[in-house]
Image (tube, rainbow, N blue to C red):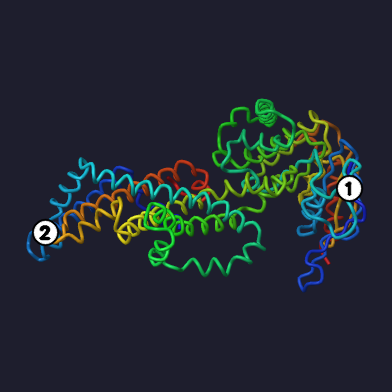
């Protein structure tokens, strides 16, 4: 589904501010997998995500999505950014925000509107379509951003610290929402986070990155019973064991 | 800081704001009345406010003045409309293609400070003193605030908003039209509002300098060269120009508040 082959990226090569964000990163994600990528802050996670999405051209190596080398944004890809208030368009209603990307598909206005409504229902915002983003709470805005991604029916959904800007309760709700929607939609999800517990709770697999320049230092399979539950999963011995292991991997490379 | 927020007076309601403005206008008129009637100002140069207002009201039913007013309105509207049609696409182009911006910057910086009124004789020589003179100068003068506000608005577009659309595979032109343009719309509208005032100044000045045909400026010009000068007519004409300016500004401000609620909400204004 997604192959990352010897990926490197250097910002401002040859300048005094040269910054090597990623160095020789290899990663393979199977179709339908929910992969969490964890790493210390500033380790190049977002650079990795932008390379997968074709938003930047990496300086070395290549990314392949569904067999095609990424040169520009791949089809059937959706991104959910951390900062919902900036990634939603404030001049549009919630429904128009969700429907906008569908203009890239061969859908008439009615079909777009219906798909948007369906996606809003699936994130629990059936009645919010006519509102504007600024009239919603932060957690609801991020639900809209997720609905926008879902309506697009991507085969690959990238999430860049999607729950980093909401309170703890909302965060848990959104984590469960992601687990729920992945069951309904056939898609691969790559979720980037700096929260170790979250990565183990949500992921089928957790990949740990080193500090910049990023490369893979750990790759763990998460075999926790489904469906996951905020209380019982988090007290499961395997969960406790895994989060400790991920924590050691992150810390081992976070401190010099 | 929170204490300051708590003690800050509530913003005045619309009715209060309007009554305050009206009170200011009445006080100003009373001052003119007093200066004129007391003889402190020469009555020939400053007629009492009541006489000016009476004359202004009288002019409404004067068909000749109606023609003057309509002609000015037409030049103003055509000039402002054309300026918007030129400046917004130009601003989008200069604001999104740095190479063109850099290449044209010296020309733009050269042209911008030239007072448009100073161009009136030159342009009049080239294209005559008809409606096209007024429209040309109005376009020239009102271009700048719209152009600059468009470019300024574009600079402020959130890169993440653009990236969001790009991530769904939209190209640069789509991003420009679907994200950058609506995101800059509040700034562009403010530019148009500023330009509306500039356009009004240019319409009337051009008419006064041209001194022929129809237009409120022409009406004022002839009242001025009459012997003795018809001061009440001049000031009554000026009154109408001023009122028109206030009305257009108020309309555009109301439009901005309604259409760009999202923008004000983002700035954290409570309106």
Residue closest to the eye, B115 or B176: B115
Badge 1: chain ID: A
Q: Are marks 2 and 1 on the same chain?
A: no
**Counting other residues with Cα less than 10 Å from the Cα at mark 1, is it few (<14), some (14-19), or many (20 or more)?**
some
Residue closest to the eye, B43 or A103: B43
- In the rendering, at what x and y percent does residue A25 appear? 90, 55
Q: Give the answer, above or below, for where A48 lies relative to A88.
A: below
Image check: A177 left or right of B42?
A: right
Q: Secondary structure at mark 1?
A: strand
Residue B34: give its label: 2
- In the rendering, at what x and y percent does residue A132 appear? 56, 38
Residue closest to the eye, A12 or A26: A12
Res B103 quadrant in image: bottom right
Res A182 quadrant in image: top right
How far apart in space, not on screen, are marks 2 and 1 (Cα)? 83 Å
Residue A69: give its label: 1
Q: Residue at x 69, y 45 (%)?
A: B165
Badge 2: chain ID: B
Residue B81: give its label: none
Q: Give the answer, above or below, for where A75 lies relative to B82.
A: above
Evaluate if marks 2 and 1 touch, with contact meaning CB atoms under 8 Å apart.
no
Q: Quadrant of the N terminus of chain A?
A: top right
- In the rendering, at what x and y percent does residue B224 appear? 20, 60
Q: Give the answer, above or below, for where A114 lies relative to B64.
A: above
Q: Give the answer, above or below, for where B42 lies relative to A3.
A: below
Count the marks: 2
Q: Secondary structure at mark 2?
A: helix
């Amino acid at each position: 589904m997604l192959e990352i082959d010897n990926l490197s990226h250097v910002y401002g090569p040859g300048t005094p501010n040269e910054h090597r964000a990623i160095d020789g990163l290899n990663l393979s994600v199977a179709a339908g997998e929910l992969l969490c990528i964890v790493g210390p802050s500033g380790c190049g996670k977002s650079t990795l995500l932008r390379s997968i999405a074709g938003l930047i051209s990496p300086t070395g190596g290549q990314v392949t999505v569904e067999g095609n080398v990424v040169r520009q944004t791949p089809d059937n890809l959706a991104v959910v950014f951390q900062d919902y208030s900036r990634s939603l368009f404030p001049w549009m209603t919630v429904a128009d925000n969700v429907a906008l990307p569908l203009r890239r598909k061969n859908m008439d206005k009615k079909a777009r509107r219906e798909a948007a409504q369906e996606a809003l229902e699936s994130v629990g915002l059936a009645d919010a379509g006519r509102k504007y983003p600024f009239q919603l709470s932060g957690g609801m805005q991020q639900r809209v951003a997720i609905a926008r991604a879902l309506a697009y029916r991507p085969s690959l959904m990238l999430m860049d610290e999607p729950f980093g800007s909401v309170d703890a309760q909302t965060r848990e709700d959104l984590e469960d929402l992601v687990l729920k929607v992945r069951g309904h939609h056939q898609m691969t999800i790559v979720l980037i986070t700096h929260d170790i517990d979250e990565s183990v709770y949500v992921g089928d697999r957790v990949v740990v990155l080193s500090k910049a320049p990023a490369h893979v230092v750990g790759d763990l399979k998460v075999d926790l019973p489904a469906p996951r539950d905020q209380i019982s999963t988090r007290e499961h011995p395997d969960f406790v064991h895994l989060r400790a292991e991920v924590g050691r991997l992150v810390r081992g490379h976070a401190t010099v | 800081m929170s204490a300051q927020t708590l003690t800050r007076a509530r913003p005045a309601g619309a009715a209060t704001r309007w009554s305050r403005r009206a009170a200011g206008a009445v006080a100003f008129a009373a001052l003119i009345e007093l200066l004129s009637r007391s003889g402190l100002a020469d009555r020939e140069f400053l007629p009492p406010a009541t006489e000016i207002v009476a004359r202004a009201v009288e002019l409404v039913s004067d068909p000749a003045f109606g023609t003057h007013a309509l002609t000015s309105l037409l030049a103003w509207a055509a000039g402002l409309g054309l300026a918007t049609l030129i400046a917004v696409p130009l601003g989008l182009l200069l604001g999104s293609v740095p190479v063109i911006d850099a290449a044209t910057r010296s020309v733009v910086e050269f042209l911008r400070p030239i007072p448009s009124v100073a161009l009136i004789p030159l342009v009049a020589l080239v294209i005559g003193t008809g409606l096209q003179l007024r429209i040309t100068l109005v376009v020239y003068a009102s271009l700048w605030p719209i152009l600059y506000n468009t470019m300024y608005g574009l600079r402020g577009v959130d890169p993440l908003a653009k990236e969001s659309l790009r991530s769904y595979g939209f190209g640069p032109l789509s991003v420009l039209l679907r994200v950058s343009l609506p995101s800059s719309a509040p700034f562009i509208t403010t530019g148009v509002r500023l330009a509306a005032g500039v356009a009004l100044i240019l319409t009337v000045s051009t008419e006064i300098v041209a001194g022929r045909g129809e237009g409120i400026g022409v009406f004022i010009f002839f009242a001025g060269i009459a012997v003795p000068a018809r001061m009440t007519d001049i000031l009554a004409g000026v009154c109408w120009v001023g009122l028109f300016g206030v009305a257009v500004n108020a309309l555009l401000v109301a439009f901005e508040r309604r259409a760009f609620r999202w923008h004000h909400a983002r700035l954290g204004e409570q309106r």
